Amino acid sequence: MSADRVTMLIDVSKCIGCRACQVACKQWNQLKAEETQFSGTYQNPPALSGNTWTLVRFNEVEGKSPNKTTEWLFRKDQCHHCGEATCEQVCPTGAIQRTDKGVVFINQSICAGCKYCVETCPFQTPHPDHETGTARKCWMCLDRLQHGMEPACATACPTDTVRFGTRVEMLDLARSRLAELKKENPDANIYGDDDMLGGLGVMYVLPEKPSVYDLPGNPQIPHSKIYYRWAMGIIPGLAILGGIWAYLTKDES
Amino acid sequence: MGHHLNWGIPLVIDLFTAAMGAGAFMLAVMADLSGRAKYRTTSTVGALIAPWPAIAGVALLVIDLGKPLRFWEMMLRRGPGLLWLKSPYLMFNPTSTMSIGTWVLTIFIYASFGYIALTILSYFWEKLALLRKLMGLAGLPFAMAVTIYTGVLLAASPNPLWNNAMLPVLFVVSALVTGSAAVIACMAVLRILDLIEPAEMAAVPRLEKMMSVILVVNLLVALAFVGLGLGTAEMRYAVGGGLGLLWWVGIIGLGMVVPLVAGLKGGEKQPHVSLVLAALVLMGGLFLRYVILVVGQTPIA
């Protein structure tokens, strides 16, 4: 990973759930609105899709103190631009590419719509779009980055929940925020530092454990187990083939 | 199942037919290598049917793409800067099981056509027998990979039903079973239509017994697959609440246990009986892929 890798830091403790990031993303990337129905939560649309590349998730959890019976947790969800990206590894067409600054994007003129990235992403961020036939997701507003601007969501955020800069800057910022949050909450953590999937290009500072925010605690790239899985097929397969051959050959009738 | 499936019924059918074709190919090569005249018809029938279900499966895979006309993007790499021109370089991504599968299926289909040609030609020129066997051996790794890659492909998903270590074993064993069933079914049909001599059916009881033994393995692997995933809600939905009847009656009962018991008894059966038993095995193989693929994509509350 190059030294000038860019990173987004989402400090969920500052999020007020205004969804300015969602709207800015839709506007800049000219993504269609979705018709939705009330499903008992303010989270809307209910999930990421081919036309919703970022989404503020609204989680209601039990509060910790008696005068705070319910806590409302907000988390901006989107592609994490993993340092070792599952989607990039499993793409059979080479449509999923990475810029030298670490932005992972799906080349829409190559993607054939096989949906393998959709099925395997540990964060379930790429989604098929039925109009284009391709998989689509956040591309960190690559066109803005190329003109020296920040991604639309980071620009729109009114509370500095969404910060954008070099990886070194963002890691420093994350550490100082973590120290702050640790004072009140021992479970506070940085999600997506360099130990996770080669470092997430979109990191979080979380006041609670990742599972409270519906994030996988220890996401893995599938490639790490591919050889073992092949062996699990080849060894029994060869054994049975040998058995068939012996059975047919030793037929004396 | 009101929600949309990313990988739908075309993929279910492909997982079944491609494995069946590859299984028939492997049986044909083993029958060929046995060197016994008794299995000459078995080998020829297996060779002749092998590529067609795989081709049908590949066609369905292409149709199921979001952009079917871009299937070639999986095979040819674009040249830098020449977006409208296909570069002469082949597209291959070794970390992508989908990419491996693309090539394995392609090579298997070509190899099985080579094997068909040599199988037919060697009826007229017996000296080609050695070349035919070598062609079969060369195609064998690709046939086996066709059956295994699907299990590895699904294992890349974080979904607990697909991320099951027994899946590649289950698929390779099921491929050998359904491939054998396809060969038996075709021989039975040929006999019913009086296109082959009664003497050529002599191999069938032996093949049925062999299939029964592999069915025992298939049954044990299927149970191990269930046991390994029993801790997850997805598996309990597949074999319990949601699709339990299909799993235990359709796949395990009718698709495995009934033909297994009937085949172990041995003895020559009426071709109609052989056909029905083989059809049960094939049906079980198809439902097995259906349950695994559909439940794997069903959100479970």
Image (cartoon, grey):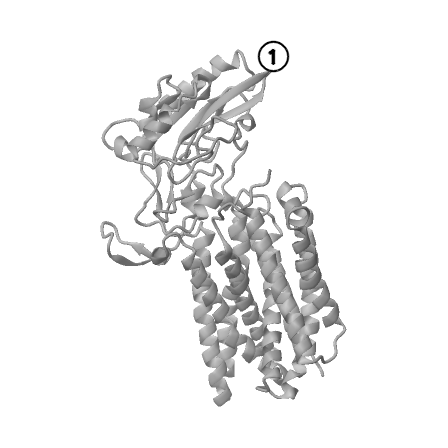
Q: Quadrant of residue B61?
A: bottom left
- Quadrant location of the C terminus of chain B in the rendered image: top right
The crowding category of the residue bearing disc 1, from other C-alpha atoms within 10 Å (few below 14, some 14 to 19, many at least 20), is few
Q: Give the residue displayed 47% in from the left and 13% down from the top.
A: A180
User: Label 1 is found on which chain of the structure?
Assistant: A
Q: Residue at x 51, y 71 (%)?
A: B50
Q: x, y percentage for residue A107?
A: 32, 45
Nearest the viewer among A232 and B190 is B190
Count of picture labels? 1
The three-letter amino acid code for the residue at tag 1 is Ser
Left or right of B268 on screen, residue A63: left
Q: Position of residue A51 (x, y in %)?
A: 37, 38
Q: Quadrant of residue A143?
A: top left
Q: Is residue A80 left or right of residue B291?
A: left
Q: Answer whether residue B70 is visible to the viewer in this image.
A: yes
In the foreground, A247 or A153: A153
Position in image of residue A117 (x %, y %): 44, 45
In terms of depth relative to the viewer, which is nearer, A24 or B26?
A: A24
Please, is residue B73 above or below residue B273 in the view?
above
**Depth check, front residue: B76 or B246:** B246
Which residue appears at 35% of the width and 47% of the height?
A131
SS at mark 1 in the image: loop
Q: Which residue is mark 1?
A: A65
Report x, y in % for residue A112: 37, 52
Q: Is residue B293 left or right of residue A132?
A: right
**Is A55 left or right of B246, judged from the image as shown?**
left
Q: Residue placed at 51% from the left, 52% from the top?
A: B153
Q: Is residue A242 visible?
A: no
Q: Residue furthest right?
A: B265
Question: Where A168 falls versus B125 (above or below)?
Answer: above
